[in-house]
Image (spheres, helix red, strand yellow):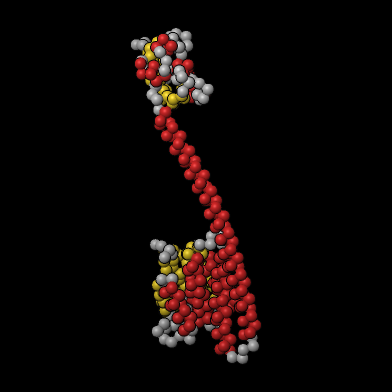
Amino acid sequence: MVITDSLQPDHPIIFANEAFQRLTGYDRSEILGRNCRFLQGRDTDPQSVRKVRNAIEAERPINIDLLNYRKDGSTFWNALYVSPVRSESGVVQFFFASQFDVSERVEAQRQITEQKQVIEATVRERTAALEAALEVKTTLLHEVDHRVKNNLTLMGSLLRLQSRALPDPRLRQTLENMLERIDALSTVHRRLYESDDITRFDVGTFAHDLASDVLGAARRPDIRLKIDAEPIYIPTEKATAVALVLNELITNAVKHAYPKECGGELVLTVSARDDHALIKLQDDGPGFDPDMPNPDSIGRALIERLSRQIQAETCWDVTPNGTGVSVKFPLYQ
């Protein structure tokens, strides 16, 4: 520790203890009468020195780390604390300054900072590499989805041309049912191709598109479609099964709930509750008996099988005023 006389020009040191002499390498005779700035050197931070000078001029204490120099030219980090000492009248007569060698702490901090910078640089490089790899993977998967969509569309077109030559109306209807499922799968791959995230599939947006497409293809302007579908994301691997379930529900409702020239309101909702997705479809048709044989038994069987595949609970609610069906399945399993 040292004490300087603030009443003398340039605040000379008037006291320095032995610890200060050992820390700096200077004898008492080389210290007394000098300003503390003699400990500064080439690499001492000018901004830190300015802060000390401003604090002394403002007669307020300051605590700061400074790079100082010993007599032999070696450096040490000095945890400097300077405080004014006032007389009874409030006049600053002295400044008390304590020094503590914190070179090890500062060096440790420097090493930590360097290691942090190295780690951050490594992380940035690794992240950039992963992002590049993901971009390549995304591009490839988008290309696959695009080609699958095109192939499904081509397949559907060829089968529709072939169906016109079938003499049996029942065979044509069966083939048309299969083509509707192909169209649903094509829409799935179109959505995946357009998506920026290859790991997730938006059920809500897909349901809106699919319902509109089915009604448009059926040419049923007498069916009023009401959709309340919020964006809900599921893993991509569930997309096909969920899409086919939706397709079966909507097409069955259009065909069986509303005979030709007997329209109504079809309500489709898609929502998420407690980590589960919930798809509900409600028509206001005449209803049916779920325990009786169903002419579209393939569709019902397909819904049941796909529901098991996505771990869904499928419930039918049939009343004289219409049929409702709900499909609830976990979002993340």
Front residue of 269 and 72: 72
Q: How many marks?
A: 0
Residue, far top: 8
Counting from the top left corner in percent of width and height, residue 43 is at 51, 25
Counting from the top left corner in percent of width and height, residue 199 is at 50, 62
Front residue of 259 and 95: 95
Front residue of 274 and 81: 81
The answer, for residue 57, to whether it is visible in the render is: no
- Residue at point 48% right, 86% down? 295
Counting from the top left corner in percent of width and height, residue 157 is at 63, 78
The answer, for residue 294, to whether it is visible in the render is: yes
- Residue at point 50% right, 82% down? 256
Give the side of residue 78 with respect to residue 244, left or right. Answer: left
Residue, far bottom: 167
Residue 319 falls in which quadrant of the image?
Answer: bottom left
Residue 193 falls in which quadrant of the image?
Answer: bottom right
| In the rendered image, the vertical position of residue 330 relative to residue 37, given as above or below | below
- Residue at point 63% right, 76% down? 154
